[in-house]
Amino acid sequence: MEYLFIFISYLFGSIPFGLLLTKFFIKQDIRKFGSGNIGATNVLRTGNKILAFSTLVLDILKGYIPVAISQNYFPDLIQISSLMVFLGHVFPVWLKFKGGKGVATYLGILFALSLSSSLLFVFTWVIVALIFKYSSLSSITATVTVLIINILKDAALEAINPDFTVQYDIKILLFIFLILIIFTHRNNISNLKNNSEKKIKI
């Protein structure tokens, strides 16, 4: 059952909500619109804010639900379940392994793993987005911030109490997510360097 749940986590993460919602409600293939991405930011470029918000919420939930289930029933699989959900979104079998950038799904995983880290991510994302108006820059900056703060927090707690231990250490997992999010945003990083990255309207 444990190995089956790992596979289920991947399948859950691979549900392309952005594609399904835009095809059903506005009869468009989101992959042929804007950046071609299936995530909420590109759905927003259709001008339909309700669909964009719905995509965001559903992509967050598909990250949250499998990890929350893992916490309750398969605690030894929390980290692998988290990773498989994310990989499902980025490399969905239904779309020839060409999926989204994983930010909303990553946020859903964070909500399950650490409420404080997820709120830190949201706060950082919003502040950077309000200042620079780039979704990609906001996502990368927020992901880096979450990793750094978790490293500093654990180091500080261990310095105060040498016997301090966490229920499960997520720093390595957060580092892997950072590498994957940088990878999925590689074209955006190039566009930022060339001043050709599209801004978002807030």
Image (cartoon, rainbow, N blue to C red):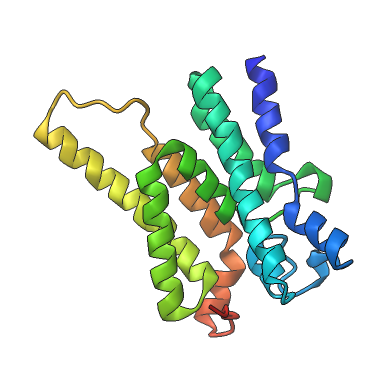
User: What residue do we see at 56% from left, 55% from top?
Assistant: 103
Q: Does 196 sit left or right of 75 as displayed?
A: right
Instruction: Point out residue 165 in the picture as x, y percentages from the top left corner.
Output: 25, 25
Relative height, residue 80 to residue 171 (above, below): above
Q: Quadrant of residue 37?
A: bottom right
At 67% from the left and 41% from the top, the residue drawn is 13
* Residue found 64% across the figure and 26% down from its top: 6
Where residue 138 sits: x, y (%)?
46, 67
Would residue 168 be found to the left or right of residue 12 on screen?
left
Q: Quadrant of residue 32?
A: bottom right
Quarter of the image for the N terminus: give it.
Answer: top right
Q: Is residue 195 left or right of residue 54?
A: left
- Most extreme residue toward the right, as rendered? 27
Residue nearest the observer in this picture, 143 or 183: 143
Q: How many marks overall? A: 0
Residue 183 at least partly seen: yes
Q: Of 189 and 106, which appears nearest the observer?
A: 106
Q: Is residue 12 above or below residue 163?
A: below
Where does the image place residue 131, in percent across and percent down from the top left?
Answer: 40, 79
* Left or right of residue 161: residue 114: right
Q: Position of residue 199 (x, y in %)?
A: 56, 80
Closer-to-camera residue (192/153): 153
